[in-house]
Structure formats: C-alpha cells, structure tokens
Amino acid sequence: MFVLADIEDTIPLHPSTFSLPALTAISDQINVKYANRILPDVGLCISLFDVLSCSEGKVRFGDGCLYHRVTFRLIIFRPFTQEVLVGKISSSDASGIRITMGFFEDIFVPEHLIPRPCAFDHREQAWFWLYEARSEEVAADPLLSSQEERMYLDAGERVRFTVEGDAFWDAEPGPPPAQGEGAVTKEKPHYSITGSIAGSGLGLVSWWTGAEAAAEESGEGQEVVEETA
C-alpha cells in the first residue's frame, strides 16, 4: 500500500528559518510542499521519510532565501494491482460504490465488479447482494427479492476490496469547458483507484467475520488433535 519514492528538488529556506537546524528546516519545507499532493505516475505523497543528500545553500538575488539541492525519499500511497485493502463505503449510486480510506477518497467499485446477483436499491440508495437467490427468476432480477434476503452494502460499513487498477489525470491548461445554465461541474480526480468486491472474502468485513472465526477454531482444534496423536 505504501512505497518509497526518490525525489530530487531545490528547496528554498526563508531567512525566518535560519535559526533552526538546517535539516529540520529543510524537512519542514519538503512536507509543506509535498504532503497530500498527487505526483503523476507516482502516487499520493504522505510525508517525508528521510533525506539522502543535501548541497550547501546558495543565495539568489532578490529574496534572501537559501536554496538547497536536496535528494530525499517520500512515503507514497500507491497500492499494487490485486492488493487487498479495507476501507469504508462513503456513498453509492446506480453506477457503483465509492470507498474512502480516510486519507484518500477516490476509490470506485463499478457495477460489474460487485458480486452477483446484485442490484441497486434506489429507495435505500445502496447496493445489495443475494447470497442465495431462492429462484432463477429472482437471480435474474434481484429487485424481486424480499428485504430479508438482501445483504446491503450501506454507507459507513467497513468493506474489503482488491485493487484492479489506478489512473492519473493531469488537467490541461486553458479555460474550462463551456457549461449549460445551471450545470454543475465535477472535477475529475487527479489520482483514482478502481476496486473490486467480487470475490471470496471480499465485500463487507461483517459478512466474513463468522467464517473467519470458525476457520480459526477449526485450525486450533486440528492442532490439538495432532498433538494428542
């Protein structure tokens, strides 16, 4: 989920920071510049990990700042494909489910990566899954099922998902596209992740809690039998 990225950059130190140790002032400036920032094809910067090298500061005419050429490593959030993560459902609509990690919210599970049979309940504004459809007709149209049969994926629930892919988007300079009167412009995320909950052990964490506990008890019982034997 987290990786290290080597970065080289010129970091300016304002005269007001000269009373601080140089490494402390440089570290603070790196965090100010990079923390919570998306680097294209790298990921979401979390914080500075360490400083590998730093040149002597040079003064440029005009501002009195010391400029240091610094090589450092950043902690980056960029999970690999098929990595299993746990987050919370933030919202749902007919196109899919949105998940948040708390510090990162642009995770989307499209409709075709939700376990079948499933459907979107417009009244509840949530997707649901049928563990066992009582008939082929209900399996073909899950909205014919009763409330008791439905396993809802409600907002705020903890959900386990796999990473299917990610995408970076860098806005092109220029005027924004023309919008009709009353239209709401939704900004495209600069970094987004596509997830899947269609698989064994995936979906709401609560769905599998009982099965995991039973598996652990079975494993402990098997160990006791082997020791007795």
Image (tube, rainbow, N blue to C red):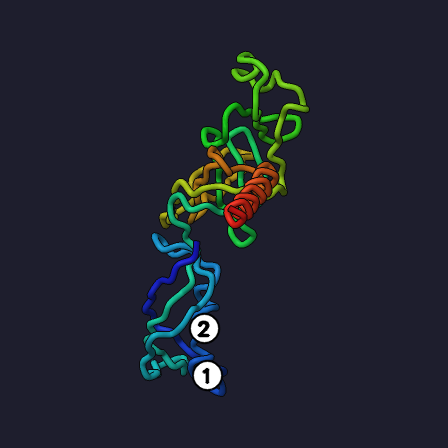
* Residue at 33% across, 65% down: 6
Q: Position of residue 212 (x, y in %)?
A: 56, 42
User: Count of labels shown?
Assistant: 2
Q: CA distance from mark 2 to mark 1?
A: 13 Å
* Residue at 54%, 17% in the rendered image: 139
Query: Residue visible at 42% across and 69% down?
Result: 49
Disc with the residue nearer the chain's start (2 vs 1):
1
Most extreme residue toward the bottom, as rendered? Answer: 19
Is any part of residue 133 visible from this angle? yes
Q: Quadrant of residue 88?
A: top right
The nearer-to-camera label among 2 and 1 is: 2
**Dividing the picture into quarters, in which one does residue 55 lie?**
bottom left
**Residue 196 location (% of width, % of height):** 46, 37
The answer to which of 111 and 151 lies nearer the viewer is 151
Give the farthest residue toward the front.
Answer: 229
Amino acid at the residue labelled 1: Pro
The secondary element bearing badge 1 is classed as helix
Of the pair 106 and 64, the residue shown nearer to us = 106
Let me know if residue 89 appears in the view: no
Mark identifier at residue 94: none
118 over 62 or under it: above or below: above
Q: Which residue is mark 1?
A: 15
Residue at 44%, 66% in the rendered image: 33
Residue 22 vs 116, above or below: the answer is below
Name the amino acid type tagged 2.
Answer: Gln
Which x, y percent locates residue 98?
53, 40
The residue carrying mark 2 is 29
Horizontally, residue 145 falls left or right of residue 196, namely right
Q: Mark 2 falls on what kind of element?
A: helix
Q: Is residue 222 above or below residue 92?
A: below
Residue 93, placed above or below residue 85: above
Label 1 Cα neighbours within 10 Å, binned few <14 / some 14-19 / many ≥20: few
